[in-house]
Amino acid sequence: MSIPIVRAVAELRRTVAEWRRHGLKVAVVPTMGALHEGHLSLVRAALGRADRVIVTLFVNPKQFNSAADLAAYPRTEHEDAAKLAPLGAHILYAPFASEMYPEGFATTVSVAGVSEGLCGAFRQGHFDGVATVVAKLFLQTGADLAFFGEKDFQQLHVVRRMARDLDIPIEIVACPTVREEDGLAMSSRNVRLSRSERQAAPKLAAILYDAAARIAGGAPVDATLEEARSAITAAGYARIEYLELRAEEDLAPICFLVMNTFLFIWFLALSVRFEEQTQLLHLFE
Ligand code: AMP
């Protein structure tokens, strides 16, 4: 069993046009490859809602703000194709950079508001790169549905806003974060953690969860975040980039809890960028 790999947008459009003639519903799952169970959960969700599923694999240079990070990003197309085939995904769209960004390419899609702050404050141009490539993938595939992970919560907001603002007729479906048995969120970057970082990483999720549970139980936000910051530092991670409470709806900063729809989110850097978050919403249930 194998999955067809498509490199050119013209070929992709021909296939999708044929599907459309048969009235089939099409979903897209954008990825940068090095697929793990988190990605595969999106593919399964897509197969549950659509007749045809396109998985895209493109390590998008425009969303990396460090050449070293781009060079070190894992590339495992052969293994990725082997993981997708048995699931029943229909096409692996893996365009070359020259197909996505031909000579003379000059357009940037930039989403204000939700792109600012959090990761946006630390990764200059990152969300412009994401919004640009995802807009292209939506227009190239013409999909009815697109599946994204809640793990990259700010990205999910950026993509939703972009599709709404540009009137791209696509439903954005959010899927829950898939974790390793010890609680660490699965990520293609986890292979780059050192052994000691990998061992300690689940502690960060536990500290975050504990702080979120206390806030959900009525503890003051500022003091609880301060304690969480100390606990994270004590666990050996001094380079915290942010530790903040944000509204789930629009990612606006908040400093006290007024109802049960808030997201607690933080992000820090180890030897690789590493992010983690907990939704307070789930702690009220
Ligand atoms: P990436 O290949 O890291 O760009 O991720 C592609 C898609 O998979 C994005 O929508 C991510 O949010 C999603 N994703 C990555 N890791 C996970 C995970 N552990 N659980 C669920 N979705 C994930």
Image (tube, rainbow, N blue to C red):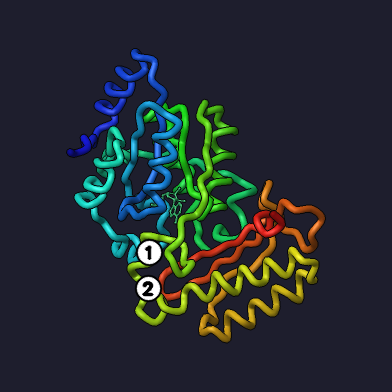
Three-letter residue code for mark 1: Arg
Q: Position of residue 236 (x, y in %)?
A: 51, 84
Where is mark 1, residue-wise?
189
Total label count? 2
The residue tagged with tag 2: helix, strand or loop? Answer: loop
* Quadrant that contains the C terminus: bottom right
Disc 2 residue crowd, few under 14, some 14–19, many 20+, Cα 10 Å: some
**What is the quadrant of residue 29 in the picture?**
top left
Residues at circles 2 and 1 in contact by the CB criterion of under 8 Å:
yes
Q: Residue at x 46, y 62 (%)?
A: 185
| 55 to 168, vertically: above or below | below
| 36 to 42, vertically: above or below | below
Q: Is mark 1 within 8 Å of ligand 1?
A: yes
Residue pushed farthest top? 21
Q: Is residue 3 left or right of residue 53?
A: left
Q: Position of residue 126 (x, y in %)?
A: 48, 54
User: Considering depth in this image, is 143 or 35 the residue closer to the camera?
Assistant: 35
Q: Residue at x 56, y 52 (%)?
A: 154
Q: Is residue 40 left or right of residue 260?
A: left
Q: Separation of disc 2 and disc 1 at Cα?
A: 7 Å
Q: Position of residue 162 (x, y in %)?
A: 55, 38
* Quadrant that contains the N terminus: top left
Residue 193 shows which numbered tag? Answer: 2
Q: Residue at x 66, y 52 (%)?
A: 251
Q: Is residue 178 left or right of residue 83?
A: right
